[in-house]
Image (cartoon, grey):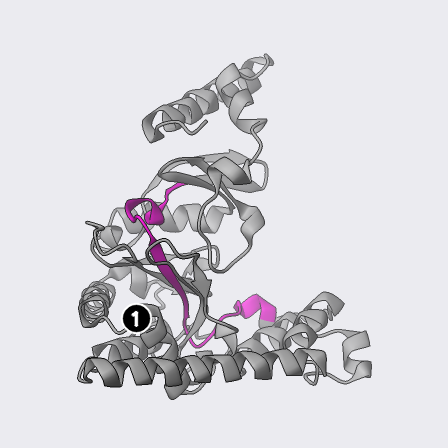
């Protein structure tokens, strides 16, 4: 059964201390950590909401805490950010434990405050690959297969057999989405309302044109001006905090995301929110290097285009919602047209995969 956050975190901390003593004295680890280490995920009772990313890295610990299998850079990023004015813009990292190469992060589940969470995951930055990836010449067939799963015409048979480098794959992801041009792309959208089942926007990673992105954001916000304004206000606050942050200026932030959340239940009390997440590829800069997060990337300058993406997303969110000025009848017609656009987009993606 699910347990309270305080009890679970106390068990984790106590178990971690017991394991440290056991390793130092050669004794067996304590029962608290053994319970946590041997615990298995139960999808029926412990399901959590995720719209993008690697699902095998997460497990729900209790009603409001998830465990993420992570890395030292992400743990350091959470510890560094929490001590700065950027702290309110990231989920709380309540506890961290190390197991060999793996860091287990006990992170606040941001969806727990919402009755019917509506979620959009936005990958931020014009560069989504590490500088080390740019130097790697290793060709990987698995990445070629990922490309072909999205676009069967992306590679020739010879190219698919030989594989692609990590940089070629990541660059392809950037140019087939809005990352290269706008500095952000939609990784996933989940909308929930009333008693209906949650629905997902089709193939959001392939959206590239501003009109397509406007359509997707409008679908996510359901034409609610207050929700859109709340996201824009929160993002403006985040941008001001980022521009004033020494931590941000001295770290590259690659393949990080913004998580946008609001309650699909009209009786929900929690306001719309926006948070920075995913810091597995965050890294401090060497020497006295300082980033603008807007300058174009050149090998060695570590620029990631994070603020370029924030600027562009804020511009979109700050524009009046096209549905807001319409009459009820016009809004209904616009939603029908929007549904037609979404269906046509979904059919085109399906045809491409079947070709």
In front of the other: 49 or 108: 49
Q: Residue at x 58, y 84 (%)?
A: 348
Q: Would you identify the image quadrant in which residue 264 lies?
A: bottom left
Label 1: few (<14), some or many (≥20) within 10 Å?
some
Query: From this viewpoint, is residue 330 visible?
Result: yes
Residue 298 versus residue 53 in the image, above or below: below
Q: Which residues are magenta?
A: 106-133
Inspect the magenta stretch and tell me whether residue 37 lies in it.
Answer: no
What residue sits right under mark 1 in the picture?
222
Query: From this viewpoint, is residue 292 visible?
Result: no
Q: Residue 319 appears at what percent x and percent y?
A: 22, 82
Q: Residue at x 62, y 74 (%)?
A: 169
Residue 135 versus residue 44 in the image, above or below: below
Residue 281 versus residue 219 in the image, above or below: above
Q: Residue furthest front?
A: 329
Look at the image and tell me in which quarter the C terminus lies.
bottom right
Q: Residue 15 appears at what percent x and percent y?
A: 47, 21
Q: Residue 223 appears at what percent x and percent y?
A: 26, 74
Q: Residue at x 62, y 78 (%)?
A: 350
Q: Residue 4 appears at what percent x and percent y?
A: 35, 28
- In the visual, does 66 lie left or right of 240? right
- In the visual, does 48 lie left or right of 328? right
Inspect the magenta stretch and tell me whether residue 107 lies in it.
Answer: yes
Residue 195 versus residue 352 in the image, above or below: above
- In the visual, does 23 lie left or right of 310? right
- In the visual, does 347 lie left or right of 267? right
Q: Residue at x 54, y 47 (%)?
A: 57
Task: Count all numbered tags in the image, as a single digit.
Answer: 1
Label 1: which secondary element: loop
Q: Would you identify the image quadrant in which residue 271 lies?
A: bottom left
């Amino acid at each position: 059964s699910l347990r309270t956050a305080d009890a679970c975190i106390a068990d984790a901390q106590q178990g971690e201390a017991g394991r440290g003593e056991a390793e130092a004295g050669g004794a067996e680890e304590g029962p608290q950590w053994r319970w946590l280490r041997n615990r298995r995920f139960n999808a029926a009772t412990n399901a959590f909401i995720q719209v993008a990313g690697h699902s095998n890295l997460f497990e729900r610990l209790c009603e409001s805490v998830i465990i993420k299998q992570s890395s030292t850079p992400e743990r350091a990023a959470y510890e560094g950010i929490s001590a700065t004015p950027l702290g309110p813009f990231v989920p709380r990292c309540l506890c961290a434990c190390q197991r060999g190469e793996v860091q287990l992060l006990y992170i606040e589940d941001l969806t727990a405050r919402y009755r019917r969470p509506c979620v959009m995951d936005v990958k931020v930055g014009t560069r989504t690959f590490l500088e080390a990836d740019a130097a790697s010449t290793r060709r990987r067939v698995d990445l070629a297969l990922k490309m072909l799963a999205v676009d069967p015409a992306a590679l020739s048979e010879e190219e698919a057999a030989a594989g692609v480098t990590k940089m070629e794959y990541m660059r392809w992801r950037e140019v087939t989405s809005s990352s290269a041009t706008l500095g952000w792309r939609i990784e996933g959208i989940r909308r929930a309302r009333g008693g209906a089942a949650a629905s997902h926007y089709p193939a959001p990673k392939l959206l590239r044109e501003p009109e397509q992105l406007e359509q997707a954001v409008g679908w996510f916000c359901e034409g609610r001006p207050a929700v859109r304004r709340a996201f824009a206000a929160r993002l403006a606050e985040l941008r001001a905090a980022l521009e004033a942050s020494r931590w941000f200026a001295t770290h590259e932030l690659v393949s990080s995301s913004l998580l946008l959340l609001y309650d699909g239940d009209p009786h929900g009390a929690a306001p719309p929110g926006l948070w920075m997440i995913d810091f597995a590829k965050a890294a401090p800069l060497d020497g006295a290097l300082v980033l603008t997060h807007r300058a174009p990337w050149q090998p060695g300058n570590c620029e990631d285009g994070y603020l370029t993406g924030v600027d562009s997303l804020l511009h979109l969110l700050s524009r009046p919602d096209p549905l807001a000025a319409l009459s009820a009848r016009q809004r209904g017609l616009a939603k029908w047209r929007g549904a037609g656009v979404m269906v046509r987009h979904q059919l085109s993606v399906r045809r491409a995969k079947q070709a």
